[in-house]
Image: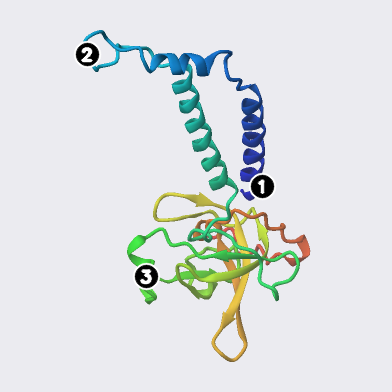
Amino acid sequence: MRAEREETARVLRERLRSADAEIEVPDGLWERVRATRGDVTAGTDVPAPRRPGPLVLIAVAAAAVAVVVSGTWWLVSPASGPAPGESTAPPADSGGGAVTLRVYNVEKPCRELRTLECSLRIARNPYTLYADPDNAAGRVWHGDRLTADCVVTDGRLVTDEKGISSTRWYRVEKAEGGDGGRLRGWLPGVRTRNTTEVPVCPADERPDRSGEKGS
């Protein structure tokens, strides 16, 4: 997204430079402006009605250019931070191809609660029924940061509470507890809002698919 903003800013800058080069002051403009100072209605102090002159039009054009420049600055300035669920730069110890994901819960009342009812499951196998009690590797909550190193695109279809469905599953892990333990498992794609490419898991690293035919 940053690359798209930079490209848009570059195009706008080129158009602004082109527009600036084409603006020329009409011959005799300043003389006409000075002449209008004494042009008033006879017997009154009220100037006669007049169409906007070239000076007014130039001022309006300059204001429009200032607005566009301000918009360009907004496009190229760095964002204050990622939105909930948006991927971020990988941490220093995550490995070269890893991506940091943030867990996303579509149920707003649960986003501030770390209760069992508001937890989301990390599965052991993306090809096994997600609700299977034996397919639970651990729990996470909205906003948790997980390190994803690869993804499968043909896993179980999972549909969230808003009707969004996906067969993408991310192989993730995160630190758990203070003893150096790690939670490892698979996060359904509907439980994040990733915007960064994650490499597809090699065939020899994918879990067993024997449980994928269950209902």
Residue indicated by mark 2: 44
The span from disc 3 to disc 1 (Cα, nearest Å) is 33 Å
Disc number placed over residue 107 in the picture, else none: none
Residue indicated by mark 1: 3
Residue indicated by mark 3: 112
**Mark 1 secondary-structure assignment:** helix
Which amino acid lies under the numbered mark 1 shown in the image of this protein?
A: Ala
The span from disc 1 to disc 2 (Cα, nearest Å) is 61 Å
**Mark 3 secondary-structure assignment:** loop
Q: Position of residue 144 (x, y in %)?
A: 51, 71
How many numbered marks are there?
3
The residue under the point 55% across, 13% down is: 28
Mark closest to the chain's N terminus, 3 or 1: 1
Front label number (3 vs 2): 2
Residue 194 falls in which quadrant of the image? bottom right
Q: Position of residue 71 (x, y in %)?
A: 52, 41
